[in-house]
Image (spheres, rainbow, N blue to C red):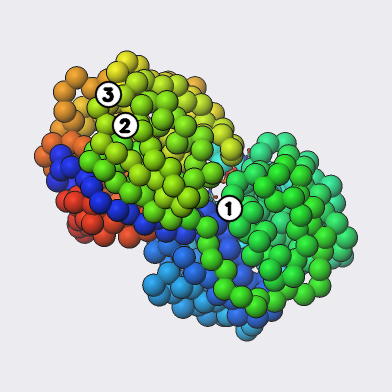
Amino acid sequence: MKNLVIHGGRPLKGEVTIGGAKNSTVALIPAAILSEDPVKFDGVPDILDVYNLQLILESMNVSSEFADGNLSIDPTQIVEAQLPSTAIKSLRASYYFMGSLLGRFGRATVTFPGGDNIGPRPIDQHIKGFKALGAEVTEENDTVHIVAHGGLHGARIFLDMVSVGATMNIIMAAVHAKGTTIIENAAKEPEIIDLATFLNNMGAKIRGAGTDVIRITGVEHLGSQTTHTIIPDRIEAGTYLAMAAAQGEGILVKNVIPEHLEAFTSKLMEMGVQLEVGQDNIFVPKHERLQAINIKTAPYPGFATDLQQPITPLLSLANGESRIQETIYPERTRHIPELRKLGMNVRDRDDGLITVESQPVDLQGDVVAAAEIRAGAALVIAGLMANGVTEIKNAEHVLRGYDRLVHKLTMLNGDIKIEDDFE
Ligand SMILES: CC(=O)N[C@H]1[C@@H](OP(=O)(O)OP(=O)(O)OC[C@H]2O[C@@H](n3ccc(=O)[nH]c3=O)[C@H](O)[C@@H]2O)O[C@H](CO)[C@@H](O)[C@@H]1O
Ligand SMILES: C=C(OP(=O)(O)O)C(=O)O
């Protein structure tokens, strides 16, 4: 295991460039096996999830090369094979191989995905979608078997709840299905548009991505002609914006699509952070006084659940009591006891209500553990704010989704390094 070691209390300043979106990347890589030609992506973030997805591709005889943000994948020699369960368990998004293998071969056998401990994460809506398309789905021990004996056909699928993963998985399964599939109550996240853009550029017919009704008309062939540039990571961007507002003395966050961050930036502005929003960048000036706010997480375009942890340390600098109601994953509060260890005045309730009171004294470094990616991001921000040394255990949770974190923070004058944890 790895630890992140931060000597906190230093003012942060300068520029940071946001990488490609993790949540697009982890869907685009499984989607690449739907292509009959080699596929190229650029703007790919340097994160552990990418390396684990490469291992899964390799097990299917799909070669890939990744350097300097460029990822090429050659699925032309793909074979059906048992997927490596350690890599599958290392990330949630390995479940996208259910949709992409089903789309490509009409069958898929995938171990239940792993991922962060953020509370229950059922996949019933994915399975409902596969069944509606004509597949038989059985679960045995820890494995899901999906087979479409008579081939896949278009269907009308109403999602019982808005699910990013189910929307993406059904799109991938349906691209070759006979006829038209309609997903109603679909998720509207920008990453879904990114996936649809990639597939449409290969010849798919997906309409309505970004709205809550998506229509997919099956096509026979998909082939890649161009390099697909991955959209900027709005969650990474929001993390740096929160960090800049909490500990910055003027930070320019580059390579952002400001529209993707509106629910987040409007909350920062409500607090009194005077953001200067450019076309593809946002400047966070040094500020004096901040006001407490209330936040409720919601599916896009609402306030992202993945940003409630990174904004929590900032709320401790506001005058008064701030509240966050986590509605997507009410148990996603594992950052709270760790933030309390650093001296933050923060509490949570079983129903996902987080209360943050203003901080009378400076935070003090301590040994804490990252239970999941965004909990880890909150601890990194708090560690940068705190006096003394903060050691964050289980750093892999953070590194699986934050592109070149140590390099970027060092360029911002942060003092942070990765160490092996031999305990
Ligand atoms: C790789 C990726 O893109 N991960 C994101 C994706 O996860 P993921 O796609 O797994 O999250 P979903 O959008 O599916 O989950 C939304 C809600 O629906 C519930 N649900 C979902 C599917 C299902 O079959 N049954 C069910 O009950 C979940 O428990 C959750 O409460 O969206 C989450 C919510 O924005 C983000 O936190 C994750 O960062
Ligand atoms: C929960 C997250 O990711 P995943 O769905 O990959 O676990 C996240 O990115 O905050």
Which residue is at a point 42% across and 58% down the rendered structure image? 19
The local secondary structure at tag 3 comes to loop
Which residue does the numbered mark 3 point to in the structure image? 289
Which residue does the numbered mark 1 point to in the structure image? 191
Dot 3 crowding, Cα within 10 Å, few <14, some 14–19, many 20+:
few
Residue 358: percent from the left, percent from the top?
27, 20
Who is closer to the viewer here, 258 or 25? 258
- Assess whether mark 2 and mark 1 are in contact (beta carbons under 8 angstroms): no
> Which amino acid lies under the numbered mark 1 shown in the image of this protein?
Glu
Gap between marks 3 and 2 measured at Cα: 12 Å
Dot 1 crowding, Cα within 10 Å, few <14, some 14–19, many 20+:
many
Number of numbered discs on residues = 3
> Which of disc 2 and disc 3 is earlier in sequence?
3
Q: Is residue 350 left or right of residue 191?
A: left
Q: Quadrant of residue 334?
A: top left
Against 21, residue 367 (above or below) is: above
Residue 47: percent from the left, percent from the top?
40, 61
Specify the farthest residue to the bottom: 77
Gap between marks 1 and 2 measured at Cα: 26 Å
Who is closer to the viewer here, 240 or 27? 240
Which residue is at a point 38% across and 25% down the rendered structure image? 271
Q: For the N terminus, which image quadrant?
A: bottom left
> Which amino acid lies under the numbered mark 2 shown in the image of this protein?
Leu
Against 132, residue 65 (above or below) is: below
Q: Is residue 342 visible?
A: yes
Task: Establish whether ligand 1 lies closer than 8 Å to the Cβ of label 1.
Answer: yes
Numbered circle sitting on residue 314:
2
Residue 111: percent from the left, percent from the top?
58, 58
> Which amino acid lies under the numbered mark 3 shown in the image of this protein?
Arg
Who is closer to the viewer here, 92 or 361? 361
